[in-house]
Structures are given as C-alpha cells and as structure tokens.
Amino acid sequence: MRVVATGLLVAMAGLYLLARALIGAHPAWGFVRAFAEAAMVGGLADWFAVTALFRHPLGLPIPHTAIIPRNKDRIGDNLATFLRENFLTASIVARRMRRLDLATAAGRFLAQPPESQGRLREGASRLVANVLEALDQERLGGMVKGAIATRLRALDVSPMIGQALGAAMAEDRHVPLLDSVIVWVGRTLDANEGLVRAMVSKRAGAIMRWTGLDEKLANSIVDGLRRLVDEIVADPAHPLRAKAEEALARLADDLQHDPEMQAKVARLRDEILANPAITRWIDGLWESARAGLLRAARDPQATMAGKFGEALRQLGDTLQQDARLRHTINQFARRAMVGTVASYGDAIVRLVSDTIRGWDARTITGRLESAVGRDLQYIRINGTIVGGLVGLALHAIDLLL
C-alpha cells in the first residue's frame, strides 16, 4: 500500500508536468493541471502527517515529528491505565462473569464432547507423555517420593486417631471391634489350651503333680477363662467391657491432648516411615502413578472409554441438571476471577507498561506501523484524491469569477 500511495503521488507529479506543458493546447489542460497540483499538495501533506507519527520525515529533526518513538513510554503508561480502568477492575469483571455460565458450558463439553475435542485431547496427551518421558525420572521420582515422605512425616496423626476413636465410640461403632477382640481371645485360648496346662503343671509342686491336683487346677483355670470370655460376649454391660471402653476413651483423650502420648505416636510414625518396606511401598506408588499417567497419555481414547471417561460424562450430566451445583461453580469462578483481578490487576498492567518501556523505538514503530500501516497508506491515497478534487473545484470557481 505504501508503493501504491507513493506511486499515485508520482503519477500526479507526472500528470502536472504533462498538463503544464500542454496547457496552451486546450483549456481542459488547465483543469488537469489544477487537479494534479492540488493532488500533489494533498498527498505530500498526508505523507508528512503519516510519516511524522513514526519517524522524522526525510530524517530532518522537525519539531513534533517522530511522535510515537518520542512518546512510547507515555503511550505504554496510558495504555496500561486504559486497561486497568476499563477492563481489569473488579466491578467490570464481576459484571462480565455474571453473564457467563461456565458450569453449563463445561457440563455440555464433558457430556457431549465436540469433534474437535479428539484432536485437542490427542495433542494434549502427546504433550503430557512427552513431558513425562523427557523429565529426569530419578530426579523427578526422588522429588515426588521425597515430597510424599515429607508430607507423611509432617502429618500429626495422633489427634486424628484420637478424634476418629472418640467419634466411633460416640456412635458405638467400636462395639463390633471390641466383640471381635473378645472372640479372638476365646479362640486363642482354645488354640493354646495345651500351653496353659503345661505352664500350670510346670509351676506346680511335685506333690501336686503326684496327686494329680495340677490337672484339676489347670482345668479350673481353663474353664474359668472360657466362662469369663462367654460372659463378656453375652453381656454388653459386663464390668470388663466397661473397663475396656473406659481405657479406650482415655486413650482417645490422651491421643488428642497428652503431649507425651503424641510424642510416642510421632516416634512410632517416624519408625514406620523409616522401615525399608514403607520406602519400597512409596517407590511402587510413584512408579504405578507414573505408569498410569503414561498409559492414559499414550492412549486417551481408551482412557476416556473406560471408567474415567464415564465418570467425566456423568459429571457433565450432573453439571447440566443440578442448578445448585452450577450456581456454586459459577459463583466460585466469578469470585476467583474477581479476586485474581483485584490482587494481580496492577501487576498485569505494570507488565504491559514495563514491556512497552523495554522496547526500543524501532521495535514499537515497526509493530504499530505493521498493525495500522495499511489504513495509514489509504489516508495518503485519499488525501491525494481529495486534494485533487478540491484543486479542481477551486480552479472552476476561479474561472467562474
């Protein structure tokens, strides 16, 4: 377009010279000369105006030229202020987000994915797979496993166990466990009856063994223990049950409030995590997770066709049908966006301002001229044509007067 505009100006100069040479041949050449002369003036004036925006015309330091390079910092600041006041304000973003139903759009996308999602999914899957395979697995695995171990060591499990035990006891959910322990004690006694009899016989004196009293004593002990276990099983209000529940309640309280008990649990936790078996379990956990991610990334169609894909489709249906869930998600998205703008809006506009400040004059001139240069050359063309028409009109008025 610059070539067209400049070529039109040159054409007007040639037409002017031709009309001036033939002006005596016919009066019409006077109109041609007036048109070409005024067109040159208009074209040159607009060329000067357009050029003065971006650089000094002909390299001459004429005042009020090269406007954009000289004022690029102020332009950047004004652009940043414009963005901040008209786009990145909490009220404007909230008003815009209020009209958007992101939850419904997400639900529709998940429930009935468009055709383009296949290509999008494959591209994203390839990217994820390439990233996972390109990363140093020893370093990445060490970071992940170290993070898991650190989080487990930082976990204060004692209060959680105490709260869980207290909640279970409040709802009598500990009773089946207590019954199971009692039944286990009874079975253990039956399985080790011979051991009990041998212990009684070993500790009995020679006279008791000679008279056979050790056998009667062992029978009495075994039968007494069996009756005790049967009574505890049959009687929910048995005193030993009450003692056991009292001990459990005290344990739940100590786990939550006793520093000494909490320290013991913490030491036990650290000993368990230091066990090589737990280390191997964490290693296997990471390897399984990485292998699963790679399988899903390499074959997204199979992943989406399985339970994971079905879960996503069900989520999409739920988002479209549950109005309260949609409202909650949209409200969360709106608040998150408004909060982001309120917290980082100044940083965003400062990034715009600092980026423009960091450009040199040639860079910003070239980018702006590339963006609007075509229309600016139309200004030159229009100036040439309009100038010529004005000159033609003035010549006609001069002849009439």
Image (tube, rainbow, N blue to C red):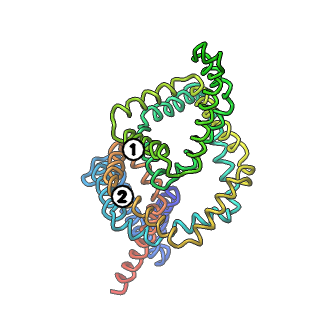
The kind of secondary structure element at disc 1 is: helix
Residue drawn at 49 percent across, 69 percent down? 22
In front here: 119 or 11?
Answer: 119
- Image position of 389 with respect to 122: above or below: below
- Image position of 201 with respect to 47: above or below: above
Q: Are marks 1 and 2 in contact (CB under 8 Å)?
A: no
Evaluate whether residue 130 shows in this view: no
Residue drawn at 53 percent across, 66 percent down? 103
Tag 1 residue: 362
**Neighbour tally class for label 1: few under 14, some 14-19, many 20 plus, Cα within 10 Å:** few
* Separation (CA) of disc 1 from disc 2: 38 Å
In front here: 2 or 224?
Answer: 224
Tag 2 residue: 339
Q: Amino acid at mark 2?
A: Gly
The image shows residue 137 at horizontal and vertical percentages of: 60, 28
**Neighbour tally class for label 2: few under 14, some 14-19, many 20 plus, Cα within 10 Å:** some
The image shows residue 364 at horizontal and vertical percentages of: 39, 48
The kind of secondary structure element at disc 2 is: helix
Q: Quadrant of the C terminus?
A: bottom left
* In this picture, residue 91 sits left or right of residue 329: left
Residue drawn at 34 percent across, 81 percent down? 398
The image shows residue 252 at horizontal and vertical percentages of: 41, 43
